[in-house]
Image (spheres, grey):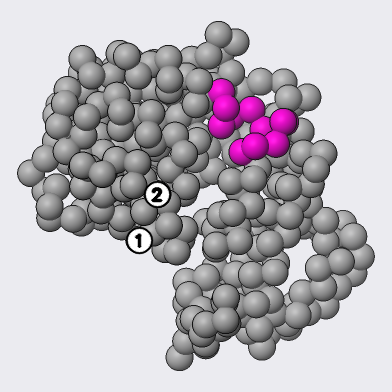
């Protein structure tokens, strides 16, 4: 039975998968909770604030790259495609793409329903002649997209280097799921953050203003609110580290003292110095990125980067599969 929770003064139901993932994540060693659960309404709002902090280079760098490549896109993708954005969030980069490719429809997909509908209304107002079809869903699995666009050629849009949040095996699975959702002949425009010095990477995920820390800590607040948790927030702090062996930034919630608490009626304890692993952000070199895309069933067509090579945007195509070689 789902438990009623209170959000913005109205009763809601705790997501059973959220409950299952949190309980499993707190039980396993090392502890880890999937990053997808950052994005309740408050988490989505905090992430938008993160994109504005000075240390967080990916958003503004990718936005500049998208503006630079927009003149190339019409000839590469053609007009009239339905644009399907995976994990659309506030869709801040989307207008650049929509203005460039003259789509037949726009389908934003996001797990945060309220945030999705609000951003869709904003985009509809900016593009009054465009059919906007918001789709609340977990895009990590193959989806039956709205029948309205069933016969339209499709252009997937996956900006923000969100692919980096997944371990490589899961990233390949996601790319394959996107191929199934979009169909053979579809194209995908995807952003990937490049490997660079830790002195640049770590501050991007541990900004001086503490916005990323609040974003990370909000996960504990959500657990307390939605799953009857009693986690003492003052027992944890945000931590971001560069794991060079795995080429990724890791975010953790680190216990600063011993703490005991309950979640959904179950008892848990954590010792000072132990962590709950909450997010990965993998970084990809040029060859790594192409191998990842091909493993997921996508053939790279064109690649663009900023002048310093910090961030790449790649256009790929779901070409017919063929036997080796």
Image point (57%, 81%), residue name: 9
Q: Which residues are magenta?
A: 51-61
**Above-or-below relation of 181 to 146:** above
Q: Which is nearer the N-term, disc 2 or disc 1? A: 2
In the rendered image, residue 211 lying in the magenta stretch gets the answer no
Image point (32%, 14%), residue name: 71
Image point (21%, 34%), residue name: 103
Look at the numbered disc 1 and give the secondary structure of its residue: strand
**Above-or-below relation of 149 to 286:** below
Image quadrant holding the C terminus, namely top left
The residue closer to the viewer here, 187 or 173, is: 187
**Above-or-below relation of 12 to 205:** below
Image quadrant holding the N terminus, namely bottom left
The residue closer to the viewer here, 243 or 134, is: 134
Q: Residue 189 lies in what quarter of the image?
A: top left
Look at the numbered disc 2 and give the secondary structure of its residue: helix
**Label 1 Cα crowd, 10 Å radius (few <14 / some 14-19 / many 20+):** some
Q: State the image coordinates of residue 263 (x, y, percent, origin top left).
A: 67, 80
Q: Which residue is mark 1?
A: 136
Q: Nearer the viewer, mark 2 or mark 1?
A: 2
Q: Residue 60 lies in what quarter of the image?
A: top right
Residue 123 appears in the figure? yes
Q: Which residue is mark 2?
A: 122
Q: State the image coordinates of residue 163 (x, y, percent, origin top left).
A: 47, 39
**Label 2 Cα crowd, 10 Å radius (few <14 / some 14-19 / many 20+):** few
Is residue 324 shown left or right of residue 252?
Answer: left
In the rendered image, residue 56 lying in the magenta stretch gets the answer yes
- The single residue placed furthest to the right in the displayed view is 257
């Amino acid at each position: 039975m789902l438990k009623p929770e209170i959000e913005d003064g109205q009763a809601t139901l705790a997501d059973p998968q959220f409950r299952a993932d949190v309980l499993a994540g707190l039980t396993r060693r090392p502890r880890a909770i999937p990053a997808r659960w950052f994005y309740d309404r408050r988490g989505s709002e905090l992430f938008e604030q993160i994109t504005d902090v000075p240390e967080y280079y990916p958003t503004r760098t990718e936005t500049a790259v998208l503006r630079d490549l927009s003149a190339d896109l019409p000839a590469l993708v053609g007009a009239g495609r339905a644009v399907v954005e995976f994990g659309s969030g506030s869709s801040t980069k989307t207008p650049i793409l929509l203005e460039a490719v003259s789509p037949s429809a726009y389908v934003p997909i996001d797990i945060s329903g309220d945030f999705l509908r609000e951003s869709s209304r904003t985009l509809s107002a900016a593009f009054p002649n465009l059919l906007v079809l918001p789709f609340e869903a977990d895009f990590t699995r193959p989806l039956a997209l709205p029948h309205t666009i069933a016969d339209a050629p499709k252009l997937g849009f996956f900006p923000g280097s969100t692919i980096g949040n997944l371990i490589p095996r899961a990233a390949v699975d996601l790319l394959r799921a996107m191929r199934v959702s979009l169909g053979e002949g579809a194209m995908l425009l995807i952003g990937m953050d490049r490997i660079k010095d830790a002195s640049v990477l770590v501050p991007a995920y541990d900004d001086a203003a503490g916005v990323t820390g609040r974003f990370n800590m909000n996960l504990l607040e959500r657990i307390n609110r939605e799953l009857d948790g009693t986690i003492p927030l003052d027992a944890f702090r945000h931590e971001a580290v560069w794991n060079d062996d795995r080429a990724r930034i890791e975010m953790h919630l680190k216990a600063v003292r011993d703490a005991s608490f309950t979640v959904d009626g179950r008892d848990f304890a954590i010792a000072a110095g132990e962590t709950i692993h909450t997010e990965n952000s993998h970084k990809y070199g040029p060859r790594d990125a192409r191998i990842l895309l091909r493993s997921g069933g996508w053939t790279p067509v064109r690649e663009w980067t900023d002048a310093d090579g910090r961030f790449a945007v790649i256009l790929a195509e779901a070409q017919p599969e063929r036997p080796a070689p």
